[in-house]
Amino acid sequence: MLSFSAKTKHELCRVQVTRPCCRTAELYGMLLFAPVFSHREIKLVSEQNAIIRRAAVLLHTVCGVYAEPTASGRRWMLRLTEEDDLRAVLGRMGYDFKSHITYHLNRNILDHDCCPAAFLRGVFLMSGSLSSPEKKCHLEIKTGHAILCREVMSLMLDIGLAPKVTERPTAWLLYWKDSGRVEDFLTMLGATRAAMALMEAKVEKQLRNEVNRQVNCETANLLKVTGASTRQIAAIEKALAVAGLEVFPENLRETVDLRVAHPSASLAELAAMFDPPISKPGLNHRLSRIMEIAERVTQTEP
């Protein structure tokens, strides 16, 4: 069964890119965040065949280079080693054919306003991951190059995204934990279904939390009512056992009877049972007097 992250990437692989500049930008994102991008070899690897097939199409369309996806265990791979192919790709991305490639972000590739989204789609397809909506929201992009990480973060800030960055022993991560920002990012890339799934999950969690809060509040109130009722009835029954009903004044006896007869009733419910009904403060005052009498009687018991 595919993970939510994999489903999101499958959705992105179905995004139609019609502008040549955006095709170049998306391929550039894939290449910069691929396992190997050098003058000796270019290698793109993914567990999802759809991503590697998309990369192969972009390579052919943008650079005129043909590469056949191959299976390697549970992963799919696209590998270029021929010098002519490498020169074509590196030259198209604005790199000299040198023995060392500095992993800087070439902003000239992203010259149009539409290109950053395409570039970041390629980045996410190659090195991004996303938690399931049922879990705490977390989207991250990993790279092994500190300078590249900072430059991509700068690009994101320029277009209104605000990722956080952290360093790990062997990598740097750009990430979000805020569901709203993750939804905006996915929508920008073209994964509208994934963004909607996150929104629906967030609303469901909020509703569930609200229901839980209400249930907890009602439970706490019920326990409070039950606790007070239990103490009142215990005191009344003890006083009745010691001195009988006559220990309570006649104007309190109806209250005594109703309290004992309805142990689970709240003050509001109990007050409404009087004929005529009385107020909650009035009932509370009567119960306080009853408790005082009961306590006095039981304390004087021989």
Image (spheres, rainbow, N blue to C red):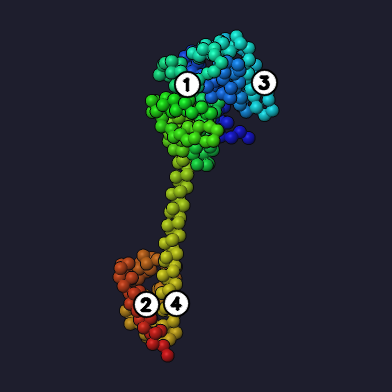
Labels 1 and 4 touching (C-beta < 8 A): no
Residue 104 tag number? 1
For image coordinates 64% across by 22% down, the residue present is 77
Does any portion of residue 44 appear in the rendered image? yes
C-alpha span from label 4 to label 3: 80 Å
Kind of residue at disc 2: Met
What whole-number distance in Å separates the C-alpha atoms at marks 3 and 2? 84 Å
Q: Which of pointers 1 and 2 lies earlier in the amino acid sequence? A: 1
How far is mark 1 from mark 2, CA to CA? 80 Å
Q: Which mark is residue 248?
A: none
Amino acid type indicated by mark 3: Thr
- Which residue in the protein does label 4 denote? 234
Q: Are marks 1 and 2 in contact (CB under 8 Å)?
A: no
Q: Residue furthest front?
A: 99
Q: 135 or 169: nearer the eye?
A: 169
- What residue appears at the point 53 percent right and 28 percent down from the top-left corner? 144
Rendering coords of residue 228 (x, y %): 41, 70
Q: Secondary structure at mark 1?
A: loop
Q: Which quadrant: the N terminus?
A: top right
Q: Please report the residue visible at 42 percent of the width from the left and 71 percent of the height from the top.
A: 229
